[in-house]
Amino acid sequence: MTTESLSLAHFTVLIINWQYGGVDRRSRDRSAWLRSVNVINQVRPMIVLAQEMDCQGNPAQLHQHLEATATALGGMTSILGPPASGTGGNHTAIFVRASAGLQVINRWPTSAPAGPREPWWCSAQVKIPGVAPAAHLYSVHLSPRSALDQLRAVQIVTSLVTEGIQFALVGGDFNGYPRQPEISPEVLAGLPRHLQMTRCRPGPNGLIPNHDVADELQRAQLFDIAAHLDETGRGPSDLRPTTEDGARVDRCHGDKRWAAAAREAKNLAVGSDHQALAVTFDLTGMAA
């Protein structure tokens, strides 16, 4: 394996919803996948937290597509999560740049049938050279159809994070609204009805955002990194929507150590109906 340098002062994590793996379900065209790969390789992240890792809904081709993606991203180590809601597609995944010395020392889920298989997330414990302690990484893709499933999944993740006082980074497609920026009533009124059912609740003068997931993450002291950068002025941030329906659903949340190390968050146009999010940290203060 080719060895490449690791800069703790410029440590980038990228979050991407691949939109069905970047492969067109009818034509099987892979041009969208290639556009995303090219953007990611320009950023050269150390970690990629991915959602909708799919291959035309074809489980027989899924692992081949996963490893092709890992290879195209520079030979990254891959971890595949279970399918969302027990379906044949839309897995979460994590990619780790082993060629820079990052080492996966634990992962979840384990190979079936060991242990339960929650459909909405996967995780990896990763040793970053020169950093203590090991990082706990979570790639999440919360349900677009059930606010209860969203909250349940996040409560399980936050319980794990707080029980172990983990050096935790939770990123992905949360399918709901953060506290910042505020969402206008006009945006909520224009949502498709099925998204109004999960992302909104009735208010005194119409629909208001459902912030249950954002509040649960805040209660666990998992900071919304982009919003934290904006509030503290520590570095450039991007609070623009990551989807065409006006929502910043693709986010990165980290504990106080990740929040203190954050330096930049920016949205990136990729071959998906979501924008990717690249977050850069300075981890020199976490030196082992």
Image: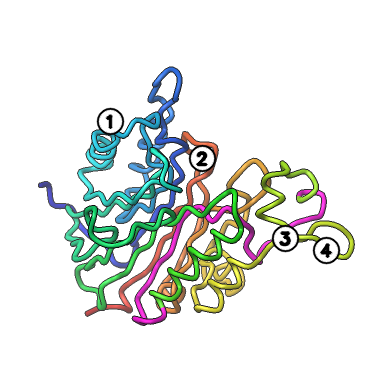
Q: In this view, does 119 lie to the left or right of 207?
A: left
Mark 2 Cα-neighbour bin, 10 Å: few <14, some 14–19, many ≥20:
some
> Is residue 13 inside the magenta stretch?
no
Could you tell me which secondary element the residue under label 4 belongs to?
strand
Q: Mark 1 points at which residue?
A: 61
Label ID, residue 209:
3
Q: What residue type is labelled 3?
A: Pro
Rendered location of residue 51, percent (x, y): 42, 47
Question: Disc 4 versus disc 2: distance between alpha carbons?
Answer: 34 Å
Q: Which of marks 2 and 3 is in front?
A: 3
Label ID, residue 203:
4
Q: Which of marks 3 and 4 is nearer the N terminus?
A: 4
* Magenta region, residue range: 162-187
Q: Is residue 242 left or right of residue 116?
A: right
Count of numbered labels shown in the rendering: 4
Rendered location of residue 252, percent (x, y): 48, 61
Q: Mark 2 points at which residue?
A: 269
Question: Disc 1 versus disc 3: distance between alpha carbons?
Answer: 38 Å
Rendered location of residue 40, percent (x, y): 37, 43
Could you tell me which secondary element the residue under label 2 belongs to?
loop
Question: Disc 2 versus disc 1: distance between alpha carbons?
Answer: 26 Å
